[in-house]
Image (cartoon, helix red, strand yellow):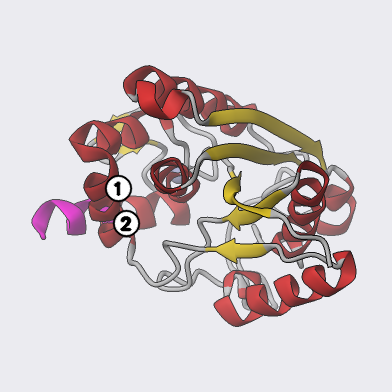
Amino acid sequence: MRKLDHNQALVLFSGGQDSSITLLWALDRFENVETIGFEYGQRHAIELDARRAVRREISRAYPDWAGKLGPDHLIDARGLKEIGETAMTAEQEISIGADGFPTTFVPGRNLVFLTLASGLAYRRGIGVLVGGMCETDFSGYPDCREAVLDAQMQANRLGMDCDIRLETPLMHLTKGASWRFAEDIAGQQGVALVNEHSHTCYRGVRAEHHDWGYGCGECPACELRAKGWVDYQSA
Ligand code: ZN
C-alpha cells in the first residue's frame, strides 16, 4: 500500500462559504495545503473568480499561511454537464424537481469530485483531502452525507491502494456555527474575508451586498447563508 503524507492536505475548494472556511481550517492545521476546483460548466464564472479572490486575500491577510498555501488545481469536469443538465449548469429555474431534489442536484457529483481529488492527491503524495461537506443543513444532496463519503473514500483507498483519508470539519456544524468556527481559527478578519470574497448565490448575483455577503437574497443558497449569518450574530 502506498503511504501518503498526512501533513499535507488538498482542499476541495469551490470558492463558497463552506469550502473557504474549510481552507482556513486546513491552513491552521497542515504543513502544506493545495486546493482543487472543478470546472463543470457552472453558469457563473463568478464562482471561479471567488476562488482566486479568497486565496489571494488569505495570502495577504495571513503571511504565515501564505507560505503554506501551495498550488491551485483546476480540473475540467465538464462531462458532468451532459449528465446533469440541471439548474446548476443549464438555464433553468431553481426549484424542487419531481425526484424531491433541488434542480441544482447533479447526481453523483460529489462522488466524482472526491475520486478525482483522490487521484490528484495520490499523484502529489498528499495524504489528506479536506472538504466543506455538511449534513446539518442537509439541502437534498445525498452525496454530502457522512456515510456516503466514508463509503466512497473506502473505495478510493482500495482502488488506489493508498492510505488517503478525508476530513470534513463542518460536517456537524450549522451554518451559524461554521461562522463561529471560522472566527475561532482566523479571528474577525477571517470571518470578514470569507463574508466579502466567498460566493454562494446560485444565480451568480454579486451586485448587492448584504450583511451576510453578496447574493440575490432569494435563492435557496442565499436564504441558507443569510439565516446562518443571523444565527451567528445573535449567538
Ligand atoms: Zn442567491
| Picture residue at 37% right of the left edge, 26% below the top | 64
Q: Quadrant of residue 75?
A: top right
CB atoms at circles 1 and 2 under 8 Å apart?
yes
The span shown in magenta is 228-235
> Would you call the spot at circle 1 few (<14 residues within 10 Å), some (14-19), or many (20 or more)?
many
Indicate the quadrant containing the C terminus: top left, top right, bottom left or bottom right: bottom left
Q: Is residue 207 visible?
A: no
Q: Quadrant of residue 123?
A: top right
Q: What is the spatial separation of the Cα atoms under label 1 and label 2, in whole angstroms?
A: 6 Å
* Amino acid found under the numbered disc labelled 1: Ala
Q: Quadrant of residue 6?
A: bottom right
Q: Position of residue 134 (x, y in %)?
A: 47, 66
Name the residue beneath numbered marker 2.
178
Name the residue beneath numbered marker 1.
182
| Picture residue at 80% right of the left edge, 75% below the top | 155
Front residue of 176 and 151: 151
Indicate the quadrant containing the N terminus: top left, top right, bottom left or bottom right: bottom right
Q: Number of numbered discs present? A: 2
Q: Position of residue 129 (x, y in %)?
A: 62, 55
**Element at label 1:** helix
